[in-house]
């Protein structure tokens, strides 16, 4: 299993809306590196949901429930989506400041490539963020 982090601005698509919907396709990715990360996602992979711009917190865990397919919001074949479903809300949101202060997370893309919207995490990094949010 692989681990990922996806970012969404809460005013565009919040964790609360995601939970109410129960499932969504992850659209709007227009960065080739993020697109390649979507293509690498496999059904069952776990995904951290991060509120960007407002809040700047990891707020929940989702899972990949359908692997990549053509983004239905565009005719451009370069862009894909995956389907995600919420799994669990973190007891305590984990802030970007907490993540930056944790030495074992210094190399994650959230810290090193702040604009990337879909990024891989190592299992130990994923687990550390979950531990911080428990």
Image (cartoon, rainbow, N blue to C red):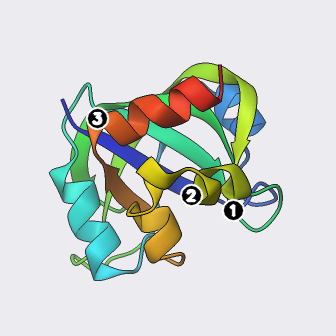
Sort mark 2 into few (<14), some (14-19) or many (20+) by Cα contacts within 10 Å.
Answer: many
Q: Which residue is mark 2?
A: 7
Residue 28, percent from left and from top? 49, 69
Q: Using the image, tell me which numbered label, if any, was put on residue 123.
A: 3
Residue at 21% from the left image edge and 67% from the top image edge: 36
Tell me which numbered mark, 2 or 3, is placed earlier along the sequence. 2
Q: Nearer the viewer, residue 51 or 72?
A: 51
Tell me which numbered mark, 1 or 3, is placed earlier along the sequence. 1
Element at badge 1? loop
Element at badge 3? helix
Residue 38, percent from left and from top? 28, 57
Is residue 49 toward the left or the right of residue 107 in the image? right
Residues tagged 1 and 2 counted as in contact (Cβ below 8 A): yes
Gap between marks 1 and 3, in whole Å?
Answer: 22 Å
Residue at 22% from the left image edge and 45% from the top image edge: 41
Tell me which numbered mark, 1 or 2, is placed earlier along the sequence. 2
Residues tagged 2 and 3 counted as in contact (Cβ below 8 A): no
Numbered disc in front, either 1 or 3? 3
In which quadrant of the rendered view does residue 127 lie? top left
Quadrant of the snapshot with the N terminus = top left
- The image shows residue 114, relative to residue 26, as above or below, that is below
Q: Nearer the viewer, residue 4 or 30?
A: 4
- The image shows residue 100, relative to residue 86, as above or below, that is below
Residue 21, percent from left and from top? 65, 30
Visible in this render: residue 24?
no
Gap between marks 1 and 2, in whole Å?
Answer: 6 Å
Q: Which residue is mark 1?
A: 52
Residue 107, percent from left and from top? 38, 63
Gap between marks 2 and 3, in whole Å?
Answer: 18 Å
- The image shows residue 90, relative to residue 70, as above or below, that is above
Visible in this render: residue 15?
yes
In which quadrant of the rendered view does residue 60 lie? top right
């Amino acid at each position: 299993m692989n681990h990922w982090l996806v970012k969404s601005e809460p005013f565009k698509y919040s964790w609360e809306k995601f939970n109410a919907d129960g499932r969504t396709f992850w659209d709007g990715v227009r960065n080739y590196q993020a697109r390649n990360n979507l293509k690498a996602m496999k059904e069952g992979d776990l995904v951290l949901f991060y509120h960007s711009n407002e809040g700047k917190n990891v707020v929940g865990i989702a899972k990949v429930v359908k692997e990549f397919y053509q983004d239905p919001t565009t005719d451009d074949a370069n862009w894909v989506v995956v389907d995600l479903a919420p799994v669990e809300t973190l007891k305590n949101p984990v802030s970007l400041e907490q993540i930056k202060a944790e030495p074992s997370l210094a190399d994650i893309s959230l810290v090193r490539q702040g604009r990337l919207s879909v990024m891989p995490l190592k299992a130990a990094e994923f687990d550390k963020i979950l531990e911080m949010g428990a």
